[in-house]
Amino acid sequence: MRETITVTLPEGMKSAIDEVTRKEGISPAELVTQALEEYLFLRRFRLLRERMVQKAQGQGILTDEDVFDRVS
């Protein structure tokens, strides 16, 4: 099921969206959906990375070399 939201954009962003959607051959809704999916994915990744870095530091893993030493 699809849901609708309304957003207010900064000046000029609508014309930038129109240009990108015209060049990409997609609708503004598709562009916004793709952008939000990417944002949410990256947000989850950053949060997971932050937790893993804290856990690794607690085990004395501070550098790429420390990681390499543990896995090789």
Image: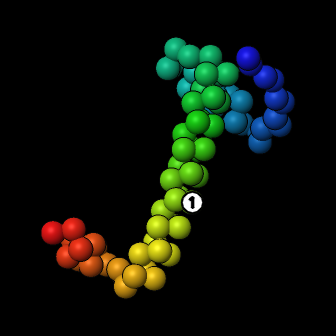
Residue at 27% over, 78% down:
66
Q: Nearer the viewer, residue 11 or 25?
A: 25
User: Is there any visible trace of residue 20 in the rendered image?
Assistant: yes
**Residue 19 can be seen, yes or no:** no
**Label 1: element kind:** helix
Q: Count neighbours of disc 1 (C-alpha within 10 A) and say few if under 14, some if 14 to 19, many if 20 or more.
A: few
Residue at (23, 74) in percent of width and height: 70
Q: Residue under label 1, please give it.
A: 47
* Residue at 52 percent of width and 14 percent of height: 25
**Looking at the picture, how far across and down is residue 33, in whole percent?**
63, 28
Q: Quadrant of the C terminus?
A: bottom left
Report the side of 66 relative to 6 (left or right).
Answer: left
Q: On screen, 2 above or below 10?
A: above
Snapshot quadrant of residue 20: top right
Q: Nearer the viewer, residue 69 or 11?
A: 69
| Residue 23 placement (x, y as % from top left) | 50, 20
Image position, residue 31 (x, y; %)? 60, 26
Quadrant for residue 40, please give it: top right
Q: Position of residue 30 (x, y in %)?
A: 61, 22
Q: Pick the residue in front: 41 or 24.
A: 41
- Quadrant containing the N terminus is top right
Q: Relative to 8, is 49 above or below?
A: below
